[in-house]
Amino acid sequence: SAVISQKPSRDICQRGTSLTIQCQVDSQVTMMFWYRQQPGQSLTLIATANQGSEATYESGFVIDKFPISRPNLTFSTLTVSNMSPEDSSIYLCSVERSGGYNEQFFGPGTRLTVL
Amino acid sequence: GNSVTQMEGPVTLSEEAFLTINCTYTATGYPSLFWYVQYPGEGLQLLLKATKADDKGSNKGFEATYRKETTSFHLEKGSVQVSDSAVYFCALKAGGFKTIFGAGTRLFVKA
């Protein structure tokens, strides 16, 4: 298994500002995923982050709004830029178990409120 | 494309009742199927999985059988507890990178 921590666990931000969310994994992983989960909703994949390459963004998400860094095999950051109240959500970091098992491990999430 | 459809919630049961949460899928090839659970204020965690037809995944009294003929992976538990109150997500992965998650079903169990 993989243990994932995220910082901050929650934050309240003013519109127009940016927040960087950190994700730390206790083991080396190839792919890390960033999801958004709006209240009472399912998960929406924002992007996939591979170490050493540009993140791959899903339709509807762009790098200028959600820049991602992946400096090594255990760490990634997601920035939510120029925030608006519509960005209020839970942001989840996830990794896939290595060895072809396909299941994913998730961090506890970052609960973001934009005023 | 690949998709997952699960029953809408919320589902409200009394303690010790039988639970079924329906999940059907559409996928090319032979996907792996999963149930994830999300307890209040937490991230998702894997509950059980099945990787081929007729496999039964089980964990913590929950079980689900991979039915290729009906493209289903229904979650069942014989006797639910208050501590089972959570949101349950059915999911599939059929090659490639992206896991497809269902909409989630919220379960409330009353004492």
Image (spheres, coloured by chain):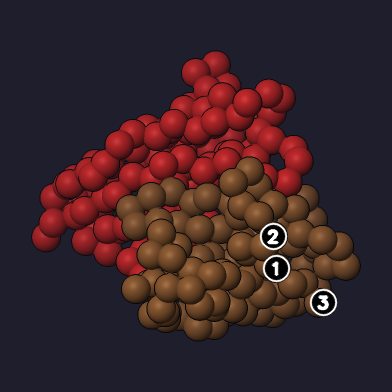
Report whether A57 appears left or right of B6. Answer: right
Front residue (pair A12, B107): A12
Amino acid carrying label 3: it is Asn
* Vertical arrangement, residue A71 with respect to residue B69, above or below: below
The answer to which image quadrant residue B37 occupies is bottom left
Chain letter of disc 3?
Answer: A
Q: Is residue A16 left or right of residue B27?
A: left
Q: Say which of marks 3 and 1 sits in front.
A: 1
Q: Amino acid at mark 1?
A: Ile
In the rendered image of this protein, which colour is used for chain A? Answer: brown
- The count of marks equals 3
Indicate the chain coloured red by its letter. B
x and y percent of residue B68 in the render?
57, 22
Q: Position of residue B73 (x, y in %)?
A: 48, 33
Q: CA distance from mark 1 to mark 2?
A: 7 Å
Secondary-structure class at tag 3: strand
Q: What's the distance in space between the residues labelled 3 and 1, CA to CA? A: 12 Å
> Residue A68 shows which numbered tag?
1
Asked if the residues shown at circle 1 and circle 2 are in contact, with their CB atoms under 8 angstroms apart, the answer is yes
Say whether residue B17 is left or right of residue B4. left
Question: Where does residue A57 sit, x and y in percent of width and height?
Answer: 69, 52
Q: Which residue is mark 3?
A: A72
Label 2 sits on residue: A63
Q: What distance separates the C-alpha of mark 3 from that of mark 2?
A: 19 Å
x 41%, y 42%: residue = B103
Kindly give the residue lying farthest to the right in the view shown. Answer: A52
Q: Is residue A5 left or right of residue B85?
A: right
Q: Quadrant of the C terminus of chain B?
A: bottom left
When asked about the image quadrant of residue B2, the answer is top right
Work out which residue is located at the far top of the displayed protein and give it: B69
